[in-house]
Amino acid sequence: MGRLQRKKASGAKKKKKRNEGSTALAKVQTFNDAGTKNAALAEARDKSIQTAKAVPSKKQPQVSRAVPAKTRGNFINSTVQFLREVKIELKKVAWPSRKQTIGSTVVVIALIILISLFLGSIDIGLSSLIRAVLQ
């Protein structure tokens, strides 16, 4: 489970992307010196590459290989994070009192006994009926 985060409105995301692109182009236009202009162009190009969405490629057949240590560390960190979140959620649970738990248990056991007696009596009645028909 990941951390809870608020989602931005889709319009806000689009505006942010437009603003980033326009600020990068504004930087390019404001520099008069050729060297700084080239640097600004490179910076704008780098930002546009970072914000561009990755194009999904065709699926390659997966080859089984050894798990690198970095993945194991990531797995351990994510497991620890998950357990921390479980602990936090368990603190939020409204646990029943001992009296409520015992009362619910008694009701469940009584219902089980009643239903088993009912089904047992039907079973005995039907088996004796079938025995009488077969003789």
Image (cartoon, helix red, strand yellow):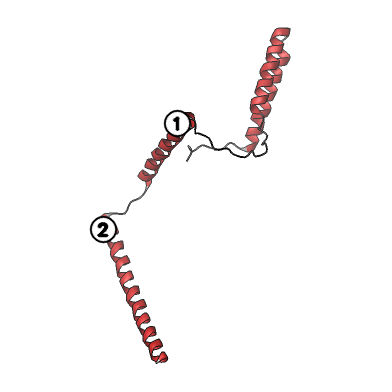
Q: Which mark is residue 37?
A: none
- In this picture, residue 121 sits left or right of residue 60: left
Asked where in the image residue 107 lies, by quadrant, the reply is: bottom left
Using the image as rendered, state which of residue 54 and residue 51 is in the foreground.
54
Write the residue at 65% across / 22% down: 47
Sort mark 2 into few (<14), some (14-19) or many (20+) by Cα contacts within 10 Å: few
The foreground one among 81 and 61 is 61
Number of dots carrying numbers: 2
Residue 7 locus on image (x, y percent): 56, 38
Residue drawn at (38%, 91%) of the image: 132
What is the three-letter code of the residue carrying label 1?
Gly
Q: Residue at x 51, y 37 (%)?
A: 5
Quadrant housing the C terminus: bottom left
Q: Earlier in the sequence, mark 1 or mark 2?
A: 1
Closer to us: 86 or 100: 86
The numbered dot on residue 73 is 1
**Residue located beneath label 2 in the image:** 99
- 62 in relation to 107, above or below: above
Q: Which image quadrant is residue 131 in?
A: bottom left
Place of residue 96 in the rendered image (x, y in percent of width and height, measured from the top left): 31, 54
Helix, strand or loop under label 2: helix
Q: Position of residue 89 (x, y in %)?
A: 39, 44
Question: Which mark's residue is nearer the viewer, 1 or 2?
Answer: 1
Q: Position of residue 95 (x, y in %)?
A: 33, 51
Find numbered disc 1 in the image and state the secondary structure of the residue it sits on: helix
- The amino acid type, in three-letter code, at marker 2 is Lys
Inter-mark Cα distance, 1 to 2: 45 Å
